[in-house]
Structure formats: C-alpha cells, structure tokens
Image (spheres, helix red, strand yellow):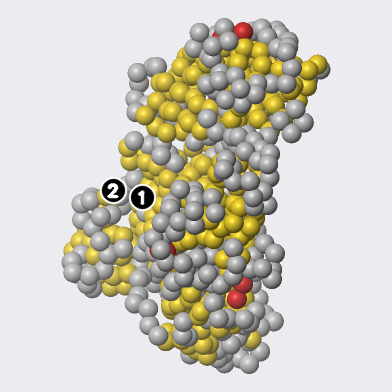
Amino acid sequence: MVLGAATLSACTDDYKDWSEPKSVAQESTVTFGDGSVSSVGTIDFRTLEAETVQVCNITAPTASDESYAPEYKITLSTADSIIDAAVFDISTDGYMSAEALQSYLEDSYGKRPVEREIQGVLSVWETSSTASVRMNSQPFTIVAIPEAPEIEESYYLTGNFNGWDNTNADYQLTNGGGDVYENPIFTCTFAAPADLTSDLEFKVTPASGLGGDWSKCLANDAENEGKFKYNNVGGNFVVTYDPNALYYRVTFDMMNMTWEAVALSFSEYIYEIGNESGWSTPHALRSPASDGSYKGYYYLNGEFKFKPNADNWDGDWEWLGDNLIGQGSSNCPDPGAGFYEIKVDLAAMTYDLTAINQIGLIGDFNSWGGDVDLTYNTETGSWEAKGVELTRGGVKFRANADWAINWGGSATADGSNAIVEGMTQDGPNISINAGTYDITLTLSTEGNHTATFIETSGAVASYSEFIYYAGSANGWSTEASPMAHEGSGTYRGWYYVLPDDGATTWGFKFVDGAWYGDAGDGKLSTEGGNINIAEGFYMLWADLPNLTYSATPTTIGLIGDATAGGWDSDTQMTFDTTEGCWTYTGDFAEGTFKFRANGAWDFNWGGDLTNLVNNGDNIAVAAGTHTVKFWPNCAGKAYATVE
C-alpha cells in the first residue's frame, strides 16, 4: 500500500483500512500493502526453551514518505470462533512472547499436547509525526502444540493394601470427570486399611496399564521430595502409617508431576440428633474438605448431641460445658426453639450455634434493597413465601438481613418454574424470569441446599419488544441499538463491535433493565463481565431464558437483476464506521435488488426502504449511478437510502 503523506494531516483517530470483511481461504503467504506475511512451521512448546517464538515471517510494507515507521500488533483467534480473539505485541521479525502464545493456546483449546490451529491477522501502523495509517493482513495460520505431559483419564493405586494386584481397580484416582488438562489434579480418598499397621506403599497404574502392565506406572522420585516420574522410573510411593487415621487422601498433580498424601481422622459427614425429632432423625453436618470443620442448617427444639454415624450411637459426642463436646454423659443444652446454623470443629472439639431469625429474598426485583421474608414451616422443614412478584434478573437468599450468610446457585428451567440445586454460601446470583412465584427454600449442608420457584399466575412469560446492545461502539447507550424479540425470549440484531484494548470500558453487554455480561462459553450472567470479541460487524443473538448468546461475523451484499452480479452473486457493500451503516456506490440497471447477509438467504431484507423486513419484496431502482446505504439493526428497525 503506497502512503501519500501529502494527503494526510494530523488526526486523533487511526485511519482504518476497511477491507471487505468476507471469508477468504487461508494461504501460506498473504500480502498487505506491498509487504507480506508468511506462516512458519509447527511450533512445539514441548521442546521450546526461548522466551520468544517466531509465529510468522514479515516483509514490511514501504511508504513513499520515509518518515513513516511501522509498528505491529497481531490478533489471534481460533479456527472455530473469533469471539475469543486477543491482540498481542509482535516484533518486526515476527516474534511474540512464548508465554503469551502458550497461554492463549491453553485458554482457547486447553493444555492437551496436540497440534492446534490459530488464525493470525497482522496489523501494521505506519506512523509519522503528523499521521498514522493502519493496514491489516489477510488471515494466516499458526500451528502450535502446547507443552504438557500425556495425561490419561484415570489412574489406580496398586500397593500393599490391595496385594500389589495390578488388575485391582478399587483405589481410583480421579479428577472429578472433567478435562484432564484443565484439571490435572487427581485424588483418591480411601478408608485406612484395617489390617495394615505399617507404612502404605504403592505405585500408580494408568488406566491403559491396568491388568498387568507395570511399564507405564508412576513411580516416586526419591531424589526430589514430593515429585514423581513416569514409565515406572523410580521407587514406591510411601505414606507414613498413622494409627489415628480414618482415611488417607493422596493427591497427584499430573501436569507438574508432584504428589502428596494426608492422613485424615475426619469423615465428610457427622450428624446432629435431638429432641426436635424425638431423637429419631439424624441431621447431616458436612465438612466439604474432610478437615474436621462441619456445618449444617436445622431447626432445634430442646437438647441435642452429635454422633459420627447416622445409623448408630458409637462414639457419640456429648456436652462438656461451655461449647465443648467429647465423651461425656450430658446432652447439649436447649438453645431455645428456632432455626440455627450449626458448626462443629472436631479438631478443637467445639460447637457453635448462630440463630437464623429471618431468611429473605433479595435481588434485581427490589434493586437489591430490603428483603422479602420467608416463613419457616416446621412441618416440611422448609422456608416458604407465597405470591412473590419478580422481574427478570438475579436473586439470592440471605439470613438475618445480612450478607454474612447467603446462598446462591444456578437455576434449571422446568416449564415456567425454576429449580435450584446444590446452592452454596456466596454462590452466584440465581437468574429468574419475570413472574409471580411460590418459593420454597430447603437448607441442609453446603452444596446440598435447594430452592424451587413455582410460577402461579398461569400466564405465559412476557418479554420486552426490544432489548439493547450497549458497548464501547455506541458509547454504552442503552437506547441506541435495539435488538428485536423473535419469540420465547430470544433477540437478534446486527451491529458493529469494538474489541477490548485493555481498558475496562471496552466490549459490550445486553441490556433489558438488567445488564447481561459474559459468563464464559457463550453463557450470559447478570454478574458477567464485558463481552470482548474481535473488531467487526456481527449478527448478535441473545436467549435470555437460557442465558446464552452468539456473535456471528457478518458481511452485507446487494443482489438482484439491477446489480452487476444479477441474482447469482452478491455485490459486496462496505461498512462505514462513521455513519454506522453499509454503503455501496456504483452503477445499477433498471430493475430490483435486495440486501442479504453472508451471501445466503437466511437473512435478507426487502420492502419499504423506511421499514425493511426479512424476506420482504424486491426493491425497485432506476438505472444510473447510486449510493446505497443500509442500516440492518433489527426487525422493525432496519432501513436504507438510495441516492
């Protein structure tokens, strides 16, 4: 690209070289200006030791004015989506931070060490003291392999507690079932072997070696404490025998090749039992980390005590005075009839009660001010509220009109109702549609609290005619950029998006009274951050009931017998960022035409220029040279001019 300095003057914004944003095949060498970018070979982080890595070869564009100097940035995106695009510094010879590229690979694809393709676009700013011109390359491909060991889906302990039986699968190490490269921490918690009074010794057998193959076993690195080696290179793992241990937990970090073992004297659950149930029903208290700290929420009415097991009284703990418990003969004293947070610390052998005098619902429906009180039902053991009118948005439960004790979680739709399972302390806001609800909250232990929202009005959920796209491209206006309701709480619109440049005010959100931001993986949340995607024009779609969204890169073309391509091919328009519309100036034959997106008929516009609609009538035009401008926006808000 030749730069005519005589035609440029000082400016506050970079000139943007808006090429037609259409899909193009990726090539080994692509040009911009009179410079070029070419791909390099596969980048293998498993063997890379340098702090920087070459991702492309750059031939710099030249300028007719030698005062211009190039500065570079590279935008990376995945082959499947550009929603996660990111911008990085790059040197004039095509080198960028190896750590940054590895992190982008991991964020985009995970850590699995297989070849991954990334799309790169190089941006060059040719800058002088008076002006700056920006040019973009066409996309090129970067192929890279993340640095990580080979990690299998499951592993098993083989040792003196199972007869060194390499076929035995009783002692499984698991990461909980997730991607092993996203969560490479594998654990196995098992009861202390009753017949073993010596140190525990074992090796770790991967699933592929179960059945007699010892060659793949993980072995202890005797020269480096807390480390292990693959391929059975090393000795046995040894865990010191603890006569007081009820359980042992071993943890292996397969990514960093470290391990540790802990002897546990605590189970996950203990139980409260007392006069409130006629001494017949044990109530679980949970220690999520099995560290001896237990908690639960229950109604008490009279004396009570604690015990290790739900089905027997062996080893139960009585009151020893003050808040101490242990082996005694007295029940814990009656605290007064009421609902309590019950805590037990078996390490200190103490208990603590916090009276729950009130539980309320708070959220977007009341601007997070004040609580709608729930009433405790001693017959059902639940907190209840009837006929609560809610607007669409987030809610939470909290105790005693304070945030010290609060619960949140993720709701699952059940028709017009909502069910919330697995709620936790300080959990996320519960997203609820507008409606009138009977609400039930059942508290027990961390991760096991539940709530139901039963819609009672019998009315179908109502939705606004429009929601709004608000972001850095429109000054975060909540009225300028509508998205039209398509039914069942889904909305669609077509708008230009500016990317994240590192400032906190960039990106965008969807607004419907509440602000819906990015919760990751195409999900929305009222607590989500700004949605940041690569700069460009998009079809934006939001599903508020299911809290999902998509952003599809979009080009607009003209098609019809009045255009150069007839009804067979599109005449591409160019997006004008100043006017916020698609434009085309050229010759037309007498006839008709339509607008359409991405060279397909899924979305096409016709009819009255002041109110264009999808699948509308062909638009008539006289022969001659015309300037056509088109604002797709959304249904009921799309229009065009022909001059």
Q: Are marks 2 and 1 in contact (CB under 8 Å)?
A: yes
Q: Is 358 located above or below residue 131 in the figure?
A: above
Q: Where residue 441 sits: x, y (%)?
A: 52, 21
Q: Which residue is painted at 42% across and 45% down in the image? A: 548
Q: Which residue type carries mark 1? A: Ala
Q: Which mark, by number, is residue 613?
A: 2
Q: Earlier in the sequence, mark 2 or mark 1?
A: 2
Q: Nearer the viewer, residue 215 or 38?
A: 215
What is the number of callouts on the image?
Answer: 2
- State the residue at coordinates (25%, 61%): 600
* Residue 594 image point, x, y percent: 25, 59
Q: Residue drawn at (48%, 85%), measured in percent from left and top? A: 40
**Would you say residue 324 is visible in this rendering?**
yes
**Residue 496 left/right relative to 71:** left
Secondary structure beneath disc 2? strand
**Residue drawn 77% across the image and 31% down it:** 348
- Quadrant into which the C terminus falls: bottom left
Q: Nearer the viewer, residue 103 or 563?
A: 103
